[in-house]
Image: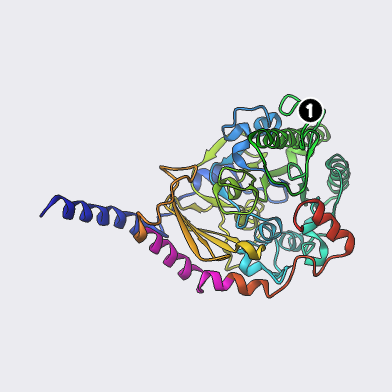
Amino acid sequence: MNKNHLFLILVVLSSGVFLSSCGSKNETDGSHIADNLPVAKGMNVLVVSFDALRADALGLYGYTRNTSPNLDAFATEALIFEDAYVASPVTPTSFAAAFTGLYPFKSFIGWKLASKNTLATVMQDAGYQTFGLMNNVQLVTERHFDRGFEDYETGPWRDEKLLEVAIEQIDKAASNSKPFFGWVHFISPHTPYEFREISAHLAGPMTDGRFAEKVGGSFEIENPEELKRARDLYDGEIFFADHNFGQLMAHLRESGTLDETIIIVTADHGEEFMEHGQVQHNALYDLLVRVPFLIRHPGHLEGDRVEEPVMTMDLLPTIASMVGVTAPGSLDGKDLRVSLDPDRHRIVTGMTNPRRYEILSASGGRKLIQLCTPEFSEELYDLNADPSETRNLVLDQPEVANQLGKLLEESISAEPCALIRSVNQGKAPQDLLSKEQIEELKSLGYIQ
């Protein structure tokens, strides 16, 4: 046997080790999660989310700039999930999955929330008073995102105003004899990124340049100086969002509500700054689909970290489990208190931009991206060796790509690109919306 033949055999064998583990059932005991998240029947639950907040822009996930002092302090008393994915890199489909525990190709069809069972309906049926305050026009009642919420409002507000409204709503709910479930979504740090005095240490004042005062809802980068300014302003928006979060936590503490409330912090997607040749959020790289995910439980205020892969789609079954409520069956989301799978198969879908339909299949530290439009192509990454996703291995490891592709098709029982095309049903994002709502979508960069 010559050296070349021996090398090929070793490559195949080493690939087989990964392939045999892909989608495996090697679930680990979730008792260390359950210890951090004890069952607390009747406890209030509050979800606080931020728009376009990438995980690695926070100190608690290793960022060196001072963007998140309040979230970092919150993390010292919370369970931190290191590897949390959203189910989609765009607001409506990400929220659809988080609300329902179902992948967006099941829960968001024809630009409407398709499932009638939502996190809010589950909590309402269990006797909770429910409210939602969503500062993003993508989440309007016309798309049925209000299902299960007794009180539901969408912006546009300035986030300072949203903070005031949220405090009033929480105080009102806390004065009731029933526990509450609430969700508050801040638009920051989504575009437009504005210069703010409060975050001048991150993005100082400028008098010249297109981005001196603001980066618009949709933008392009023309030179390295503009890229730096855009990222500085984004970091400044994170500091502003963190400040609002700190104000909210201070009020909860002073009012006595904090000790009676499970608080979850997360985001709907991340943001990109030319790391892969684009800006904003229109791809499936980890910068866009990996988000903060923290749970602070008054019954266990010791910070801890979870390395196993999870999804924000796990919110419904996990929250239900924490407060002793029965969740619907046949969910794609998992109850994180019960078990964790280090090789969990995760699917992320980009299905709202017909110019870039794509789907992600990830397991065992390997990640396959299938781009459906404008033409089919594949990218394969080894996240353990290349977390920045700089080396496309699809030509070097076709057997791994094939296995992840096969696992994807088996999981969704369909050809992925055909499925994405079918769920949109020819609908456009503005079909259900008013002229005012469409103008708001334009200001946020969703519609050109």
Quadrant in the rendering for residue 237: top right
* Residue sitting at x 66%, y 67%: 107
**How is the model colour-coded?**
rainbow
Q: Nearer the viewer, residue 60 or 403?
A: 403
Quadrant in the rendering for residue 432: bottom right
* Direction from residue 224 to residue 429 in the image, left or right: right
* Residue 33: image location, x then y, percent: 54, 45
Query: Disc 1 on helix, strand or loop?
Result: loop
Q: Main secondary structure of the magenta part?
A: helix
Instruction: State the quadrant of the C terminus.
Output: bottom right
Q: Is residue 413 magenta?
A: yes
Instruction: State the quadrant of the N terminus.
Output: bottom left
Question: Which residue is outermost to the left?
Answer: 1
Residue 257 in view in this figure? yes
Number of numbered discs visible in the structure rendering: 1
* Direction from residue 182 to residue 409 in the image, left or right: left
* Residue 109: image location, x then y, percent: 68, 71
- Please name the amino acid that badge 1 sits on: Met
Residue tagged 1: 206
Q: Residues within 10 Å of mark 1 (few under 14, many from 20)?
A: few
In this picture, is 346 found above or below 79? below
Magenta residues span: 400-419
* Residue sitting at x 50%, y 73%: 413
